[in-house]
Image: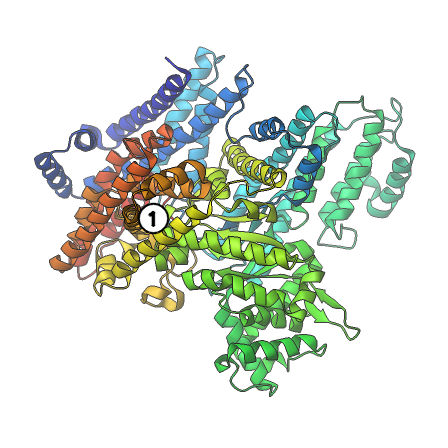
Amino acid sequence: MTQTDNQSSLLRNDVKKLGTILGKILKHHGGDTLFNQVEEIRKSTIELRQDFDEEAYNELKQKISRLKPPMRQHVIRAFSTYFNLVNIAEQNHRIRRRRQYQLEDDGVAQPFSIEGAVTSIKENNISTEVIEDVLQKLSLELIITAHPTEATKRTVLEIQKRISTILQQLDSPVLTKRERKNLDESLFNEVTALWQTDELRHRKPTVMDEVRNGLYYFDQTLFEVLPDIHQELEEQLEEHYPDTQWKVPNFLTFGSWIGGDRDGNPNVTPEITWETLTRQRELVLKKYKKVIEESMRRFSHSSARTTIDESLVLQVGHEEEKYLQPDEIWPVVSEVYRRKFAVILKRLSETGVSENGYEYSEELLEDLNSIKESVEKHQPSHHRLKMIRKLIRQVQLFGFHLASLDIRNHSGEHESALAEVLKAVHITDNYAELEESEKTAILEKVLNDPRPLLLSKDSYSKETQEMLKVFTMIKQAHEEFGSRSIEVYLISMAESASDILEVLVLAKEAGIYAQLPDGTVKSGLHVAPLLETIDDLVAGPAIMKQMFEMDVYRRHLEVRGNHQEVMLGYSDGSKDGGTMTANWKLFKAQQEIHDVAKDYEIGLKFFHGRGGSLGRGGGPLNRSILSQPAETLGDGVKITEQGEVLSSRYLLEDIAYRSLEQGASALLESTAKTSQASERADHRESTWEEAMERVSSHSLKKYQSLVFGDPDFLTYFNEATPLNGLGALNIGSRPMSRKNSSKFEDLRAIPWVFAWTQSRQLIPAWYAAGTGLQAFAEEDAGNLELLKKMYQEWPFFQSTVNNLQMALMKADINTAKEYTKLVNDEKIAERIFSDITDEYNKTRSILLEITEKQELLDHTPNIQESVWRRNPYVDPLNFLQVELIKLMREEDEQSEELLTEMLLTISGIAAGLRNTG
């Protein structure tokens, strides 16, 4: 048996073990009747996947449709619980594989590890000078959001975490018989708790609930893991380049939108944002105190046994007198470090409370560095002080703000507020109706005038007052929590230069931006446009060029270090133009904006607004990074992490480390190779880009012919998916649509993708790609060979094709057909579903030709096996969901029991398919 086979058998053993426990629990809960019912359905779905038979298929559907309460709910929960257990087993297997690499003696580094990246850099003869330059500009910032696609409750996540811990412990080869028995009992108890826990939320989470959920990941994993990634890179560089003193800067950071994302969410008020910042500070101070209390226990060095820096001794004496009461002073005078830590603890307790607290995190860093430098003088050389070095890194990374909070709002909100202000001060009565050139002229004039614009704030409408309060709050946050607490203001649906200048004008009125009478400028906020639609992505380069040519904006940029952030939306572009066109327009926009910024010597950072789902730019972090134009990676990369991605990547410390290591290693290696090479690191050819233009053009036409060209498409979407049930799932504080509208353009991309995924059609993730690729392949005899070469040699195209394969694997035409029976007009259902089926088959066929494989995902057997393992168990939930939608639509008054069962199927399918939102 090979190592790979052995590893796979270990995973299968875990799945079998957990499945057996679940079977025993089902027997206890519902006797043999429940157990046999679930087993019969399970075996039937597996057999149908292996050898499809129409008669057996219909028989299974009839059996499922005959289920009645309470049995129906038990069956739904049995399959949903199974998926949760499989997810845990697969997570544990990832940890197991990483440990196996670490135990290997042959020095083979795990792919996409820090060790692997540095080894590759060394083998490519990349010099220390190039690496040092790369490290200075390397930047990976991950932003957690509350986008509502996490269907799993926090309580359930915590049970899952405990089950995972037990599975890891059971892997130990040195367990005694008694220890193994105790762990098996604990595992059984936790799976029982999982079954007996209500998995549905009974109310929509508030914004502060979402804040608490986001903080959970900082508390549980990120506070520990982030500094470890930096430390690992430093150690690997020292091992491979021993002649250089390495000091790795803080290139990997986390930020947040939770509590700051106002776009379409009226619940995010300035008061809520302030409370969010307060909670973040409370958590990070608590974390520091815990580490410092542990440090006090360890730093017992005595001045009677070693020489402690005299300046530190004098400093401690002075600070004890200034900050501590007599009973708070460490009692052993010779234990200077413990005395110093006592002072630090006291000052941390007073931070944000009194003048005795730290005003800035830099003051805490000075104190910690004074201890480190003193200890290093009497510490044996070549033996590092890992604990205090890690704490110093934590303070550098998290400050007193924990995570920089981005503020986001819709461009229309800024325009409305400014229109009212400009009318009140008699500058223009109809600002919103002006031509773009007239708007920018007015805004530039206002920005160049050092005088304030506002009248009494009370004279404005409630909406405008609220907008002004946002900027006042940002100004106050900088004073209270530091400038890093809020660094970026994002503009949704930014379509013009005036959309960007409007934010700068509002910042001016709050004192965040100012042009002083002597001509100097101060600016405390990055202003970042969010380019979302296909049209916005195409217009983006021209908009940024216009901004860079404005004197007033250039002065703002100079104060901000000539740094510009541009956010790219993956959701709305895909919703408007289909995944193939959206991916290509995103790639092109990055290329062109990068070139514009380079011409004006502006440092750029692209912010990728990716979701967890394939239809919203989802996929592994490292693959997401490598699929970007290689020349843009050195600009810095910022990516959203949202929904179920947070729990799948950051619930467990080992998985969090591995996920971050994959992203960091991909960025480091790619950026280093790009910096070393005189040409583009991905060696893409102009013919490839021309090919993508043609593919995109064909794909866009096909996509829009269905989504916008078919008058019955929205009817099909609303009736052939569980869209209307998603709002009741209570997975987010934000409404499902902007302005509570039923229009397609106002529907958020998240429910759009979530609903298609539930019905196993996954339209946003693949539809029209097949037409685009096939049409291009047929244009010329050599085009298919060109596509094959692009797949082999171009990371962007490879990532695009591989995501399409994943989408097709998770989609299922047989199961999706069941949802067409929910459409009232059979002709509409038949026409549209026939088109979807044809496009599915066309896409699958061309993908297999391009990849030269027999089956989808043959290049990643682990993922392929995972999807195969899950698909048969998702099918019954889909059948039940269709049945429940029918019953709910027949009822005059909605039954609470039916709604609960419906929501359980949504939650179960989400757990089964995983990257759903």
Colour logic? rainbow
In the foreground, 506 or 327: 506
**Front position in the image: 744 or 567:** 567
Q: Position of residue 291 (x, y in %)?
A: 68, 36
Q: Amino acid at mark 1?
A: Ala
Q: Residue furthest front?
A: 781
Can I make out residue 850 in this image?
Answer: yes
The image shows residue 739, relative to residue 407, as above or below, that is: below
Residue with the most extreme left position: 55
Which residue is depicted at the point 43% across and 49% down? 689
Q: Is residue 838 above or below residue 440?
A: above
- The quarter of the rendered structure image containing the N terminus is top left
Where does residue 585 sit, x and y in percent of width and height?
Answer: 43, 55
Q: Residue at x 66, y 74 (%)?
A: 447
Q: Which residue is mark 1?
A: 765
Compared with 424, 162 (above or below) is above
Q: Quadrant of residue 742?
A: bottom left
**Quadrant assignment, res 597:** bottom right
